[in-house]
Amino acid sequence: DIVMTQSPDSLALSLGERATINCKSSQSVFYSSNNKNYLSWYQQKPGQPPRLLIYWASTRESGVPDRFSGSGSGTDFTLTISSLQAEDVAVYYCQQYSTTPLTFGGGTKVEIK
Amino acid sequence: QLQLQESGPGLIKPSETLSLTCTVSGDFISNPDVYWAWLRQPPGQGLEWIGTIYFRGNTFYNPSLKSRVTISADTSKNHFSLTLSAVTAADTSIYYCARHHMGGGTSWYLGWFDPWGQGIRVTVSS
């Protein structure tokens, strides 16, 4: 199984600050055949199901604010919130879909300081 | 707008078989471009993919649960179902159903999950 490791476990920032969440896979999720990274990001607010934010490591889902961006390749990926808003308080998860079983990172909790 | 709704028991006894149903509205589970999935999340913990089904009956399961899991689809009712046998306290979770994006052609893949149902909390306890 591909193990997805997120860091940090949690972070507390002031409104307007940049949030950076890291996700590392135990093996590459990049396929050179189509030049794509098989990696997605989700946001889960308290009491809600996860919401898809990003797929193919950097493609923003329709309706997702542009302050959310994804980057990285191979085994190391980053979700960035450029200017933290109150509504961004949530747990964020990465997920690989390179191979089955599909696996998720352990989550990063984002709070307002 | 696609919506998914889980239904089933909220409490089940150890060793029993859990049965959940996901009713889909706003799309047909027979849509040839879509797969459908079950996932779960133990209290306060992360997410686990359970398995995925295509309307023709093709299924993909997480090996960690494969011996106990069956996912089936009923196109006449536009719903798909999960059965999990021999449950233990470790199966206590919120269970979610979701549309599972897939890609076809030479680069076939099972991809991301979107959207998700609201989830159903299932407790395994005597």
Image (spheres, grey):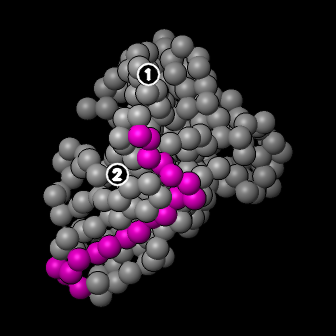
x and y percent of residue B29 in the render? 43, 21
Judge if badges 2 and 1 mark residues of a common chain. Answer: no
In this rendered view, identify the residue nearer to me: B54 or A26.
Answer: A26
Which residue lies at the image location 47% right of the left edge and 58% below the top edge?
A: A75
In this rendered view, identify the residue nearer to me: B87 or A71.
Answer: A71
Tell me the residue that label 1 is attached to.
Answer: B106
Which residue lies at the image location 34% right of the left edge and 45% below the top edge?
A: A56
Give the alpha-carbon distance from disc 2 to disc 1, as whole Å.
20 Å
Tell me the residue that label 2 is attached to.
Answer: A57
Tell me if I can see residue B57 in this picture: yes
Residue type at tag 2: Ala
Q: Residues within 10 Å of mark 2 (few under 14, many from 20)?
A: many
Residue type at tag 1: Thr
x and y percent of residue A67 in the render? 18, 63
- Residue range highlighted in magenta: A14-32
- The quarter holding residue A82 reads bottom left
Instruction: Check if residue A77 falls in the magenta segment.
Output: no
Which residue lies at the image location 55% right of the left edge and 50% below the top edge?
A: A103
x and y percent of residue B68 in the render? 76, 37
Which residue lies at the image location 16% right of the left edge and 58% below the top edge?
A: A66
